[in-house]
Amino acid sequence: MIWLGYRLQLRPKAQCRSSLTDTEWQYANSLSTKRSLQFCNGRALARQLLLRYQGVSPANADISLPSDAAPALKVCSELWQLSISHSAQAIAVAVSRTNKLGLDIEQLKPRNTDDFSREYPALTGATDQLAFYQRWTAAEAYSKYSAVPLLQVLRHSLPADLPTHYLPLNGFMLCLTYQHADAGLTITEDL
Protein backbone atom coordinates (compact mmCIF):
# COMPACT_ATOMS: atom_id res chain seq x y z
CA MET A 1 0.00 0.00 0.00
CA ILE A 2 1.17 3.52 -0.80
CA TRP A 3 -0.22 6.67 0.79
CA LEU A 4 0.27 9.87 -1.18
CA GLY A 5 -0.61 13.29 0.17
CA TYR A 6 -0.22 16.71 -1.37
CA ARG A 7 -1.06 20.33 -0.76
CA LEU A 8 -0.82 23.09 -3.32
CA GLN A 9 -0.36 25.80 -0.71
CA LEU A 10 2.18 25.46 2.09
CA ARG A 11 0.82 26.00 5.57
CA PRO A 12 2.44 28.49 7.93
CA LYS A 13 5.30 26.96 9.87
CA ALA A 14 3.50 27.33 13.20
CA GLN A 15 0.66 25.07 11.95
CA CYS A 16 3.20 22.28 11.38
CA ARG A 17 4.86 22.59 14.80
CA SER A 18 2.85 19.86 16.55
CA SER A 19 4.01 17.31 13.95
CA LEU A 20 7.73 18.07 14.35
CA THR A 21 10.24 17.00 16.96
CA ASP A 22 12.10 19.64 18.95
CA THR A 23 15.26 18.86 16.96
CA GLU A 24 13.40 19.27 13.66
CA TRP A 25 11.89 22.56 14.87
CA GLN A 26 15.33 23.87 15.81
CA TYR A 27 16.69 22.76 12.44
CA ALA A 28 13.78 24.42 10.61
CA ASN A 29 14.46 27.68 12.41
CA SER A 30 18.03 27.65 11.08
CA LEU A 31 16.84 27.58 7.45
CA SER A 32 15.72 30.33 5.11
CA THR A 33 12.01 31.14 5.23
CA LYS A 34 11.28 29.20 2.02
CA ARG A 35 13.31 26.10 2.96
CA SER A 36 11.88 26.14 6.48
CA LEU A 37 8.30 26.12 5.16
CA GLN A 38 9.07 23.25 2.78
CA PHE A 39 10.89 21.26 5.49
CA CYS A 40 8.11 21.70 8.07
CA ASN A 41 5.27 20.98 5.62
CA GLY A 42 6.94 17.84 4.24
CA ARG A 43 7.48 16.27 7.63
CA ALA A 44 4.09 17.32 8.95
CA LEU A 45 2.35 15.87 5.89
CA ALA A 46 4.27 12.57 6.17
CA ARG A 47 3.28 12.20 9.80
CA GLN A 48 -0.33 13.19 9.10
CA LEU A 49 -0.55 10.46 6.45
CA LEU A 50 0.81 7.90 8.90
CA LEU A 51 -1.59 9.01 11.62
CA ARG A 52 -4.64 9.01 9.35
CA TYR A 53 -4.05 5.71 7.55
CA GLN A 54 -1.97 3.69 10.01
CA GLY A 55 -2.81 5.21 13.39
CA VAL A 56 0.88 6.00 13.97
CA SER A 57 1.41 8.91 16.34
CA PRO A 58 3.91 11.57 15.22
CA ALA A 59 6.20 10.53 18.09
CA ASN A 60 6.54 7.05 16.53
CA ALA A 61 7.56 8.32 13.07
CA ASP A 62 11.24 9.23 13.00
CA ILE A 63 12.48 11.07 9.88
CA SER A 64 16.22 11.63 9.50
CA LEU A 65 17.52 15.16 9.22
CA PRO A 66 18.72 16.35 5.80
CA SER A 67 22.04 15.05 4.58
CA ASP A 68 23.46 13.96 1.25
CA ALA A 69 21.02 11.03 1.27
CA ALA A 70 17.25 11.04 0.92
CA PRO A 71 15.36 11.27 4.21
CA ALA A 72 14.93 7.94 5.97
CA LEU A 73 11.67 7.10 7.77
CA LYS A 74 11.38 4.74 10.71
CA VAL A 75 7.96 3.87 12.04
CA CYS A 76 8.15 2.28 15.49
CA SER A 77 11.85 1.53 14.72
CA GLU A 78 10.96 -0.25 11.42
CA LEU A 79 12.40 1.23 8.22
CA TRP A 80 9.67 2.46 5.82
CA GLN A 81 9.84 4.07 2.40
CA LEU A 82 9.45 7.85 2.07
CA SER A 83 9.67 10.34 -0.76
CA ILE A 84 9.10 14.09 -0.46
CA SER A 85 8.94 16.68 -3.22
CA HIS A 86 8.18 20.39 -3.38
CA SER A 87 7.82 23.05 -6.03
CA ALA A 88 6.82 26.68 -5.54
CA GLN A 89 4.10 26.58 -2.82
CA ALA A 90 3.25 22.89 -3.32
CA ILE A 91 4.40 19.84 -1.36
CA ALA A 92 3.85 16.12 -1.96
CA VAL A 93 4.73 13.14 0.22
CA ALA A 94 4.50 9.39 -0.39
CA VAL A 95 4.97 6.70 2.26
CA SER A 96 4.85 2.92 2.14
CA ARG A 97 5.82 0.14 4.46
CA THR A 98 7.60 -1.90 1.78
CA ASN A 99 7.16 -0.33 -1.67
CA LYS A 100 10.24 1.54 -2.86
CA LEU A 101 9.18 5.06 -3.98
CA GLY A 102 10.18 8.10 -6.01
CA LEU A 103 8.04 11.23 -6.13
CA ASP A 104 8.22 14.56 -7.93
CA ILE A 105 5.92 17.56 -8.18
CA GLU A 106 6.63 20.44 -10.55
CA GLN A 107 4.93 23.73 -11.14
CA LEU A 108 3.87 24.06 -14.77
CA LYS A 109 5.48 27.11 -16.31
CA PRO A 110 6.54 28.03 -19.84
CA ARG A 111 9.86 26.50 -20.88
CA ASN A 112 11.66 25.90 -24.11
CA THR A 113 10.88 22.20 -24.02
CA ASP A 114 12.39 21.55 -27.46
CA ASP A 115 15.90 22.32 -26.21
CA PHE A 116 15.54 19.99 -23.24
CA SER A 117 13.99 17.24 -25.39
CA ARG A 118 16.87 17.41 -27.89
CA GLU A 119 19.51 17.34 -25.19
CA TYR A 120 18.12 14.57 -22.96
CA PRO A 121 16.85 11.21 -24.26
CA ALA A 122 14.57 10.76 -21.23
CA LEU A 123 12.58 13.78 -22.44
CA THR A 124 12.34 12.98 -26.15
CA GLY A 125 8.92 12.58 -27.66
CA ALA A 126 7.30 15.30 -25.56
CA THR A 127 5.12 17.12 -28.08
CA ASP A 128 3.53 19.67 -25.72
CA GLN A 129 4.03 21.16 -22.29
CA LEU A 130 1.95 18.54 -20.48
CA ALA A 131 3.89 15.66 -22.06
CA PHE A 132 7.16 17.43 -21.26
CA TYR A 133 6.24 17.76 -17.59
CA GLN A 134 5.12 14.14 -17.44
CA ARG A 135 8.54 13.06 -18.71
CA TRP A 136 10.39 15.55 -16.52
CA THR A 137 8.60 14.52 -13.33
CA ALA A 138 9.05 10.85 -14.25
CA ALA A 139 12.79 11.41 -14.62
CA GLU A 140 13.02 13.19 -11.26
CA ALA A 141 10.86 10.57 -9.56
CA TYR A 142 12.96 7.77 -11.06
CA SER A 143 16.14 9.52 -9.92
CA LYS A 144 14.83 9.46 -6.35
CA TYR A 145 13.55 5.89 -6.73
CA SER A 146 16.85 4.57 -8.09
CA ALA A 147 19.26 6.92 -6.26
CA VAL A 148 20.85 7.67 -9.66
CA PRO A 149 21.73 11.36 -10.19
CA LEU A 150 19.14 13.23 -12.25
CA LEU A 151 21.54 14.21 -15.06
CA GLN A 152 22.50 10.57 -15.49
CA VAL A 153 18.81 9.56 -15.61
CA LEU A 154 18.07 12.27 -18.20
CA ARG A 155 20.80 10.93 -20.50
CA HIS A 156 18.97 7.61 -20.98
CA SER A 157 15.45 6.45 -21.74
CA LEU A 158 13.39 5.70 -18.67
CA PRO A 159 12.54 2.06 -17.89
CA ALA A 160 9.30 1.14 -19.64
CA ASP A 161 8.27 -1.40 -17.01
CA LEU A 162 8.49 0.82 -13.93
CA PRO A 163 5.04 1.47 -12.40
CA THR A 164 4.28 5.18 -12.70
CA HIS A 165 1.29 7.24 -11.65
CA TYR A 166 0.75 10.77 -12.99
CA LEU A 167 -1.51 13.24 -11.28
CA PRO A 168 -2.14 16.49 -13.17
CA LEU A 169 -3.09 19.17 -10.65
CA ASN A 170 -4.09 22.81 -10.90
CA GLY A 171 -0.85 24.32 -12.26
CA PHE A 172 1.30 21.32 -11.27
CA MET A 173 2.27 17.84 -12.45
CA LEU A 174 2.91 15.09 -9.94
CA CYS A 175 4.56 11.76 -10.73
CA LEU A 176 5.02 8.77 -8.45
CA THR A 177 7.21 5.79 -9.36
CA TYR A 178 7.04 2.68 -7.26
CA GLN A 179 8.29 -0.88 -7.08
CA HIS A 180 5.27 -3.18 -7.22
CA ALA A 181 2.71 -2.70 -10.01
CA ASP A 182 -0.05 -4.26 -7.90
CA ALA A 183 0.38 -1.81 -5.02
CA GLY A 184 -2.72 -0.06 -3.75
CA LEU A 185 -2.57 3.72 -3.85
CA THR A 186 -4.50 6.14 -1.65
CA ILE A 187 -4.29 9.81 -2.63
CA THR A 188 -5.26 12.59 -0.25
CA GLU A 189 -5.30 16.32 -0.90
CA ASP A 190 -4.21 18.61 1.95
CA LEU A 191 -4.80 16.76 5.20
Image (cartoon, helix red, strand yellow):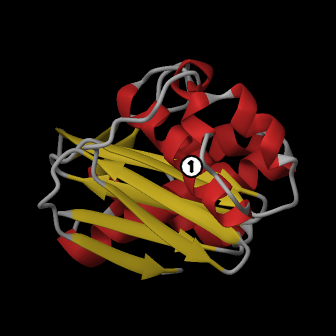
Q: Find residue 146 and report its horizontal and vertical position in percent.
A: 37, 28
Q: Is residue 40 visible?
A: no
Secondary structure beneath dot 1 equals helix
Residue for point 43% across, 35% down: 158
Number of marks in picture: 1
* Residue at 30% from the left image edge and 71% from the top image edge: 51
Front in this rendered view, residue 73 or 93: 93
Quadrant of image for the N terminus: bottom left
Residue bearing mark 1: 135
Q: Decide: is 4 above or below 104.
A: below
Nearer-the-camera pick, 144 or 66? 144
Task: Residue at 56% x, 43% y: name it.
Answer: 24
Lateral position of residue 26 relative to residue 30, left or right: left
The percent position of residue 175, horizontal first and vertical second, equals 48, 57
Q: Relative to the observer, which residue lies in front, 58 or 124? A: 124
Q: Residue at x 25, y 41 (%)?
A: 100
- Across and down, in percent, residue 131 comes to 62, 60
Query: Residue flagged by tag 1: what amino acid is it?
Result: Arg
Q: Alpha-carbon neighbours of circle 1 within 10 Å: few (<14), some, or many (≥20)?
A: many
Place of residue 126 in the rendered image (x, y in percent of width and height, measured from the top left): 64, 52
Work out whether residue 86 can be spotted.
Answer: yes
The residue positioned farthest toward the left in the image shown: 182
82 relative to 144 in the view: left or right:
left
